[in-house]
Image (spheres, rainbow, N blue to C red):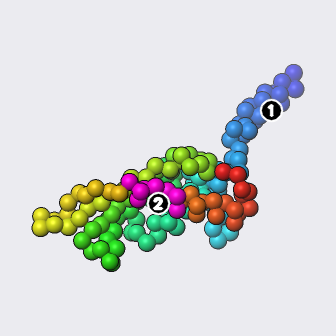
Amino acid sequence: MRILPFVLCALVLAGCGSSSNDMPDADTGTTAISGGTARTVGVNSYLWHATLDTLSFMPLASADPFGGVIITEWYSAPQTPNERMKVTIYILDRRLRADGLKIAVFRQTRSNEGWVDAQVNAETAVKLEDAILTRARELRLAAGGGTGS
């Protein structure tokens, strides 16, 4: 009879342990180490940091590392002051995958009436996605994460 409480405790504690599905694989990159302190983000940390690096020239309006959403403020390049862009990026996966990003680019031009929505070149989002994925792979390789995607 004295063994029964120990068995029940062991079963309860075993149920609290992490399963193999909870363990991150090499591509999740969900733990970022900065200044010797580990922080956990809700999305792939390589994609997260690569996105922040790639968009570092634009001011950020919002960045949610747990939901995986990065929104920039409007940005005008010095060479084109009558045009501005805004970017929203959704990181959709905990793994480093090409389909783990969704990018929305908005463009406006200045007219006599003020800022007016304008057509965005379809290649803009594709080039931005390529730059982020390339940077994410560089970060993973620098962290010793291997070469597979």
Give amino acid for label 1.
Answer: Ala
Q: Residue at the left extreme?
A: 112
Residue at label 2? Answer: 128
Residue beneath the point at 64% across and 71% down: 35
Q: Secondary structure at mark 1?
A: helix
- Are circles 2 and 1 on residues that touch, CB within 8 Å? no
Closest to the observer: 4 or 53? 53
58 relative to 47 in the view: left or right: left
Q: Residues within 10 Å of mark 2 (few under 14, many from 20)?
A: some
Q: CA distance from mark 2 to mark 1?
A: 51 Å
Closest to the observer: 32 or 113? 113
Rendered view: 11 above or below 86: above
x and y, in percent, of residue 90 in the image: 46, 50
Residue beneath the point at 12% across and 67% down: 112
Q: Residue at the top extreme?
A: 1
Residue at label 1? Answer: 10
Rendered view: 20 above or below 49: above
Give amino acid for label 2.
Answer: Leu
The magenta region covers 122-131
